[in-house]
Image (spheres, helix red, strand yellow):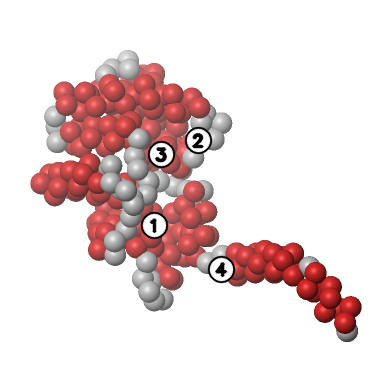
Amino acid sequence: MYEIISFLIDNLFEIFFWIVVLLFFVIMITQRNFMGKGFLLIKRGSYKDAIVLLKNKLDKKPLKSSTYYALGYCYYMLGYGQHAINNFEKAIDLKLKRIDVFYLLAILYAEENKFDKASGYIDKGEEIQNKNGFLNKLTQYERNDFWGWFYYLKGEMDKSLEFYNIAIPKWNKKMKEDRKKITEYYASPCYRLGIIYLKKSDLKTAKKMFSLSLKASPESIFANKSQEELRKLSKEEKDS
């Protein structure tokens, strides 16, 4: 008995360390809740499955801003604009600390021709971009993409191209760096860039962007839209 006590005293720190490590792994395994699984499903582009998983959490307390954000993002990627807006705004009400939600709301309202609302959200995003305590700060090319698309939806093509002419080289560099791991993240910007390239009469690059969007997230609304644009381009080539 004395030897056991002596051993425990001599190795107290090491024993404590391994207990902490063990507890950490137990917590990680047992707490692989919907949010972790939901995150993985989103990263795979499985938005419908993620929604089912995330909705189950809404019955539990306390409600989390991240849950509403994730739901909003899934609805956004599937093209359910009003559902996306509702969840994004609930996330903001619960003090979500992510900046991209303001830009996403701006685009969603602009798509509904509610440009005053859209302007308010995109201005708010710019206002807090440099504040501390917020996650997911956007790069300049991401911001230019949102601003460019905002003006595209407003029908102000010259302003839209001002932003995209700055953003495009950065996006091209980013996609070149990530060419072997094009994830669902690229689905929406690649679709938007494809449309802009069409406006610039660069059909070859437009087709490349639409194909990347389709590859990045086949389940998304942006893949569907990209596929439709590719069909139209193919038809035009056959008819010409």
Q: Work out how far the residue at label 3 is from the one at label 4, CA to CA, in angstroms.
A: 30 Å
Q: Amino acid at mark 3?
A: Ala
Q: Amino acid at mark 2?
A: Ile
Which label was assigned to residue 211? Answer: none
Residue farthest along the top direction in this orientation = 240
In the rendered structure, which disc, 2 or 4, sits on the residue that comes first in sequence?
4
- Mark 4 neighbour class, 10 Å CA radius: few under 14, some 14 to 19, many 20 or more: few
Q: Which residue in the protein does label 3 denote?
A: 187
For the residues carrying marks 3 and 4, which lies nearer the camera in this image? Answer: 4
Q: Work out how far the residue at label 1 is from the one at label 2, CA to CA, in angstroms.
A: 20 Å
For the residues carrying marks 2 and 4, which lies nearer the camera in this image? Answer: 4
Q: Which residue in the protein does label 4 denote?
A: 31
Look at the numbered disc 4 and give the secondary structure of its residue: loop
Q: Amino acid at mark 4?
A: Gln
In the rendered structure, which disc, 1 or 2, sits on the residue that comes first in sequence?
1
Residue visible at 20% across and 28% down in the picture? 160
Residue 155, percent from left and from top: 14, 32
Quadrant into which the N terminus falls: bottom right
Q: Which residue in the protein does label 2 denote?
A: 182
Look at the numbered disc 2 and give the secondary structure of its residue: loop
Q: Work out how far the residue at label 3 is from the one at label 1, CA to CA, in angstroms.
A: 16 Å
In the rendered structure, which disc, 1 or 4, sits on the residue that comes first in sequence?
4
Q: Work out how far the residue at label 2 is from the one at label 4, CA to CA, in angstroms.
A: 29 Å
> Where 101 falls versus 30 (above or below)?
above
Residue visible at 84% across and 73% down in the picture? 7
Asked whether residue 143 appears in the rendered view, the answer is yes
- Mark 1 neighbour class, 10 Å CA radius: few under 14, some 14 to 19, many 20 or more: many
Quadrant into which the C terminus falls: top left
Residue visible at 39% across and 76% down in the picture? 61
For the residues carrying marks 1 and 4, which lies nearer the camera in this image? Answer: 4
Q: Which residue in the protein does label 1 denote?
A: 70
